Amino acid sequence: MNQEDFQKLCNICKKPHSETTKACRKCKDYHNNYSKKIKENRLCRQCCKPLCETDKGTCIECTDKLLQRRKTKKETRYAQGLCYVCSNKLEDIKYRLCKSCSISKRKSYNKTIRKQKDLVYNYYGGYKCNCCGESREIFLVIDHINNDGNIHRKEISKGKHSSSSRSHKLCSWIIRNNYPPMFQILCHNCNYAKSQGGCPHLKQDTEWLRNSLESGCNSY
């Protein structure tokens, strides 16, 4: 068998095929039909047992096994001085990823953060301060309406991460909990002023409304 024929072998059944994909048409159709049945009947992808309401794709037992298998794989490769993603030799033993995998992982991570942030901000009114109307993204932040943000962020991040990581975890938590009504979008100024007894913008609006009502009453 020459090199060209070897490159056209299906990566599932190992038979020659003329498709441009790694798997042949027969294996692809079988896999697609199998996945469709699994989703329709809400079965675990690994053991085919019925899933609970809280399970997503795999049951709890299979999820624990997969996580343990990945952990063992990472530790084994790291002990051998290899990147745990591509198995290439690490340039520096203190890092667990090679340079190319580290860059790729960072790009994927940033893309996920951007997507989740857009979903959260758009749900709560878009990139605009709910108090003063500031619309520049760099000035905006997710505010806890009940002023319990410090406690809540520490709970969901377990106090082990930076502020940027806590912000990402907060967006993930909001999406998983179906966007609870305890949040709003504020700029940093309004957020800080709110924690110091109230935002001046709201106070000015209240005084303006009071003065307008008093002037209106005095005109009669």
Image (cartoon, grey):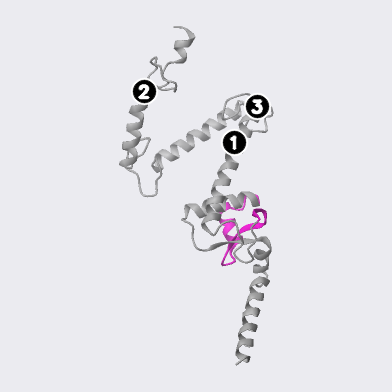
Q: Nearer the viewer, residue 39 or 85?
A: 39
Residue under label 2, please give it. 25
- Taking the view exactly as shown, the residue that stands out farthest to the front is 220
Vertical comparison of 209 with 89: above or below: below
Residue 194 pos. (x, y %): 64, 68
Span highlighted in magenta in the image: 136-162
Q: Report the amino acid beneath label 2.
A: Arg
Give the residue at mark 1.
105
Q: CA distance from mark 1 to mark 3?
A: 16 Å
Q: Is residue 201 above or below residue 21?
A: below
Q: Closer to the camera, 99 or 117?
A: 117
- Tag nearer the camera, 1 or 2: 2
Q: Amino acid at mark 1?
A: Lys
Residue 151 shown in magenta: yes
Q: Secondary structure at mark 1?
A: helix
Q: Which residue is mark 3?
A: 90
First reached walking from the N terminus: tag 1 or tag 2? 2
- The quarter of the picture where the N terminus appears is top left
**197 or 137, which lies in front?**
137
The percent coordinates of residue 45 (x first, y second) are 37, 36
Q: Residue at x 46, y 56 (%)?
A: 178
Does 155 sit left or right of 64 as displayed?
Answer: right
Labels 2 and 3: the sequence-earlier one = 2
Q: Find numbered disc 2 in the image and state the secondary structure of the residue it sits on.
A: helix
| Residue 90 seen in render | yes
Q: Marks 1/2: CA distance? A: 31 Å
Verify CB contact (< 8 Å) between mark 1 and mark 3.
Answer: no
